[in-house]
Image (cartoon, rainbow, N blue to C red):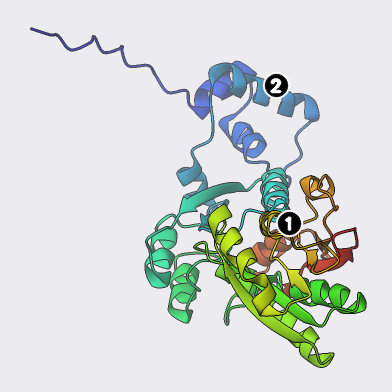
């Protein structure tokens, strides 16, 4: 007969009183120091002594209790969806989380797959975040924004190709990427341009606006755009390359560098010369694209804002209730190489 493993004896949880005794200060001083209260003058030596005592004891402030005292949390909720994970977005989210942490916010990522827009908003509201930065997925509705605001969120912010009514917006307008790519191809004398539309889930959020931007720029110049649905698979690329001559295209904007590399290899395998018969351009400016032969032309994207996003979020939290703000972040420029 098996026996249950012996349970460890309960260990006491360190309290702020324990920290105060070890540091030789009052509990109020411990609270001021560990909650980064800058309104009370405390010497740096005392602050260091309190932090060292807390570290030695393994004490951390109780987030819920701190939220009750302050009337709101310091939590910024970052819902996660199936969104494009290109280098630009990875860099943005990494820097945003680091900068928010330096401003004494706690960033919590929340898996929201399988929830519709209003269900997601209610789930987020249960955590009582002080701010929500929604990067895509089901669009927030006026109902969802109201639920979050009533639950204590002082700033509801969307991050995506288009703003949402009633919320602050950090806009990455993907139309500028398609427009930039096609403008480059037009400057190279191309007039019959394919635009790859990735068929993987979630990528339409960026792929469709890039097509809109490409089409707008092409039509202004009297050029033609041909949408090209493509799965990120060798077989799908080979099938597209096999009928390339029937499409009558002399260039392609392939959504991003990964799709461009996939399609370019399939075109070369089908005997289509690049850039002679077909010019190719991607987006993201990946190092790997520069190692191809011919080297891949690309659209380089950067984020430009008057105020760092973390500081913007902090300002919106501290001065809540104003008119929703829109901040356009995305800048794009073509990087010409041999493939176009």
Q: Which of marks 1 and 2 is in front?
A: 1
Seen from the viewer's position, the closer of residues 291 and 101 is 291
Q: Quadrant of residue 135?
A: bottom right
Q: Residue 328, labelled with which disc?
A: none
Locate the N terminus and report the quarter of the image it occupies: top left
Visible residue check, residue 36: yes
Q: In which quarter of the image is residue 276?
A: bottom right
Whether residue 35 sits left or right of residue 5 in the image: it is right
Image coords of residue 61 (percent x, y): 53, 35
Image coords of residue 220 (percent x, y): 82, 92
Residue furthest toward the front?
A: 271
Q: Residue at x 57, y 80 (%)?
A: 166
Q: Residue at x 74, y 77 (%)?
A: 249
Q: Residue under label 1, please give it.
A: 268
**Count of numbered circles in the view:** 2
Image coords of residue 274 (percent x, y): 82, 62
Q: Residue 49, labelled with which disc?
A: 2
Instruction: Tell me how far mark 1 sits from mark 2, CA to CA.
Output: 67 Å
Locate the C terminus and report the quarter of the image it occupies: bottom right
Whether residue 189 sits left or right of residue 161 in the image: it is right
- Tell which circle, 1 or 2, labels the residue nearer the N-terminal end: 2
SS of the residue under disc 2: helix
Q: Which residue is drawn at 61% across and 21% down?
A: 55
């Amino acid at each position: 007969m098996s026996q249950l493993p012996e349970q460890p004896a309960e260990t006491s949880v360190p309290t702020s009183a324990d920290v105060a005794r070890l540091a030789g200060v009052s509990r109020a001083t411990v609270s001021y120091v560990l909650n980064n209260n800058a309104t009370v003058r405390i010497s740096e030596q005392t602050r260091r002594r309190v932090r060292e005592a807390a570290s030695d004891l393994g004490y951390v402030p109780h987030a819920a209790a701190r939220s009750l005292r302050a009337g709101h949390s310091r939590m910024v909720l970052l819902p996660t969806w199936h969104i494009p994970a290109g280098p630009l977005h990875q860099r943005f989210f990494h820097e945003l989380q680091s900068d928010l942490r330096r401003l004494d916010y706690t960033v919590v990522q929340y898996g929201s797959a399988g929830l519709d827009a209003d269900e997601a908003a209610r789930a987020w509201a249960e955590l009582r975040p002080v701010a929500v930065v929604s990067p895509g997925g089901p669009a927030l509705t006026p109902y969802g924004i109201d639920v979050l605001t009533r639950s204590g969120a002082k700033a509801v912010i969307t991050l995506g190709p288009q703003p949402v009514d009633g919320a602050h917006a950090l806009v990455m307008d993907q139309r500028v990427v398609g427009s930039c790519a096609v403008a480059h191809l037009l400057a190279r004398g191309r007039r019959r341009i394919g635009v790859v539309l990735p068929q993987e889930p979630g990528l339409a959020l960026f792929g469709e606006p890039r097509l809109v931007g490409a089409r707008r720029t092409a039509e202004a110049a009297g050029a033609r755009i041909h949408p090209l649905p493509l799965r990120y698979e060798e077989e799908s690329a080979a099938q597209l390359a096999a009928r390339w001559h029937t499409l009558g295209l002399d260039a392609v904007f392939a959504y991003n560098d990964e799709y461009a590399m996939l399609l370019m290899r399939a075109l070369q395998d089908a005997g289509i010369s690049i850039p002679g018969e077909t010019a190719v351009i991607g987006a993201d400016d990946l190092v790997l694209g520069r190692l191809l032969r011919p080297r891949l032309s690309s659209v380089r994207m950067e984020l430009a804002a008057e105020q760092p996003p973390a500081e913007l979020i902090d300002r919106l939290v501290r001065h809540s209730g104003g008119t929703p703000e829109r901040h356009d972040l995305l800048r794009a420029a073509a990087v010409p190489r041999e493939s176009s």
